Structures are given as C-alpha cells and as structure tokens.
Amino acid sequence: MRGFSLIEMVLALSIAAAVLVIVFGGLRAGLGAWSRGEARAAQIDHARGVIVLLERALDGAFPYRFVLAEQREPRVLFEGRPAQVTFATLAAPFPGAAPIAFTAVSLSSEETGLALRQQALPNLLALDRLAPVLVDRETTVVRFRYLGEEPGTWQEAWDMSREETLPRAVEITFVGRNSASNAAPQVLTVPIRAAMP
C-alpha cells in the first residue's frame, strides 16, 4: 500500500530521460566545438609554419650576382612575377648536409599548391627542372607583389634584366584550401634588408 503509483513512476522516468537527453546533447555539442577548435588550431599552426619558412628565406635575400648562360653581363638574382619569385638567400629554407653560403630559392603557385624549390649556389641555375623540396597542398593560391624605391609603389613584377637592386619588400597573399569563401586572404609583407650588391 505504501509504494509509488504507475503515474508517479512514469513521471519520474520521463524527467530522468529528459535530463539525460539534455546532458548528452550538451556533451555532444561541447565535443563538436572542441574538435572544430582543434582543427582550426591545427590550420593556424600550419599557416604559421609556412609563413615563418617563407619569411625566414626572404629575410635572408641577398643581391647575389650571377651570369645567365645566354648573357655575358652579371645580374642580380631576383626574378619576381605575380605567381612566382626566384631569389638568392643566405638562409636556406631547408639546409643541406654541408654548410652553403648562398642558396637559390623559387616559390611558386602551382596546381598542387605552394611549391618551394632550392639549389645551392654557385651552380648553373636550373630551378625549373628540379623537383620541389616542399609542396604545401593547403595553400591553393599565392600572389606576390614587390615594393620599388618609391614608397607605396607596389609592382606586379620585378625583372632582373631591368632592375639593379632587390625590391624593398615582398608582399605575399595566401589563400588556404579550408578558408571560408568570404574570409579575407592572409597577407604577409617581408622587408628586404640587403638592397645593393
């Protein structure tokens, strides 16, 4: 005679079930937010690693003079186009087994992503025929601009047959594979310290 009625049992079990649904729903939402945060942190770490690699290589850019096979006059090794830049640097992105003073580096936007090629100097320049040392598939588009002698005069190209110095800075614009369609691209401006040979 002193027990719970069927209605009381059903009501208690319904309240317990509702509490469990709320708790597990909150737990699932929390785990989803956690995994999205981890994915975003991994994406930011990857982008930061690529930026540091490019910044270090461009920061060591040096007005290295060389002679092309078809020319007799020495030129400064710095060729810049909107989708590719080739330069000599004191800071090789991937150091070799033996210490080398100068390394030729080519950064280009290709179908597979951002490609980095490097070659020890002095050598006959053959960067276009070398396999990339690094292909970043997460970076889908890379664009370069070059700052001339006049402040604020950004150029789309830097031709080593016409220019006698390095640009004052290089602007790199990145678009990542996982970037939202309305997200602003990342822009990195690297000043070049050495200008005259």
Image (cartoon, rainbow, N blue to C red):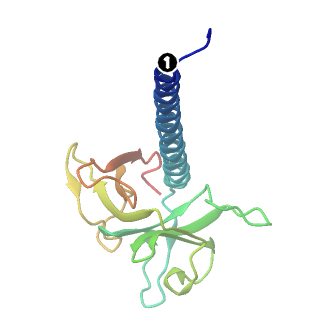
Residue farthest top in this picture: 2
Residue placed at 49% from the left, 83% from the top?
128
**Rendering coords of residue 31 (x, y %):** 54, 38
Q: Left or right: 89 with respect to 82?
A: right
Q: Which residue is mark 1?
A: 8
Nearer-the-camera pick, 35 or 79? 35
Image quadrant assignment for residue 159: bottom left
Q: Is residue 97 above or below residue 123?
A: above
Q: Is residue 67 above or below residue 88?
A: below
Residue placed at 62% from the left, 80% from the top?
123
Q: Residues within 10 Å of mark 1 (few under 14, many from 20)?
A: few
**Rendering coords of residue 12 (x, y %):** 51, 21
**Rendering coords of residue 9 (x, y %):** 53, 22
**Element at label 1:** helix
Nearer-the-camera pick, 138 or 6? 6
Amino acid type, label 1: Glu
Residue farthest front in this picture: 1
